[in-house]
Amino acid sequence: MKFKVCGMKYNPAEVIQLGPDYLGFIFWEGTPRNFTGQEIPELPVNTKAVGVFVDESIENIFGIIEKYGLKGVQLHGQESVEYCFELYERLQKEAPEVELIKAFAIGPGFSFESLQGYLEVCHYFLFDTRGELPGGNGTRFDWEQLRDYPYEKPYLLSGGIGENDCDKLLHFFRTPQAECCMGIDVNSKFEIRPGEKDINALKRFLKCGIWK
């Protein structure tokens, strides 16, 4: 079970000490968690830096990959299948070690059939909650909707997950719809302020039985 902490800005060095598999750094001006212009601390080999982008140009994404040494690209906007194919093909040629993640906002009426075209080019998906912002809305979607997920592509579960959700997560991981869930992505529910994570809350969450 992988653990991803997203929306890093003010205290990434402290979060690194907890040993997350992924740290998400948002490169989008529409959020107070925007990391542009800062420096990522040196990461251990088992923690990957993931850049989060919202409808960004491919050229700019590659500039940020090179500048920050990213190992993952997470697309959190309305990126089309064609866009993802173009990005994936360039990654394969220039940065094959970089994983491509496409986030989808889940809400009432969402159709998983719309993911079909992305299967070939994404290493995995991320399922977040539909809201006013592309991410970080602090609310959970109905995980029962994942019963309709028809693919074998692994996904990260995101959207308003907090330390009080341990029991819900333990129940979720006993259900068939959790079969392809590769990990948990957390953000706003573990913040003191946007971009600053509550280290003690993260430590308590990591004691949840899902990590055993």
Image (spheres, rainbow, N blue to C red):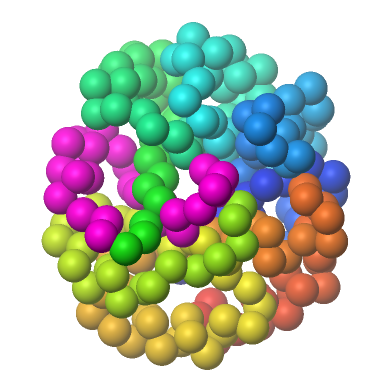
Q: Residue at (56%, 66%) from the top-left corner?
A: 139
Horizontal placement of 123 versus 24: left or right? left
Depth check, front residue: 69 or 36: 36
Res 86 → quadrant = top left
Horizontal placement of 78 versus 21: left or right? left
Horizontal placement of 207 versus 130: left or right? right
Residue 107 position, x and y percent, is 36, 60
Residue 198 visible in the picture: yes
Q: Residue at (23%, 37%) from the top-left corner?
A: 118
Depth check, front residue: 183 or 189: 189
Residue 42 position, x and y percent, is 76, 37
Q: Residue at (22%, 73%) from the top-left corner?
A: 147
Horizontal placement of 74 versus 196: left or right? left
In the rendered image of this protein, does residue 54 appear above or below residue 108?
Answer: above
In the image, which residues are magenta? Answer: 109-135
Residue 85 visible in the picture: no
In the rendered image of this protein, does residue 23 appear above or below residue 212?
Answer: above
Q: Residue at (83%, 55%) from the top-left corner?
A: 193
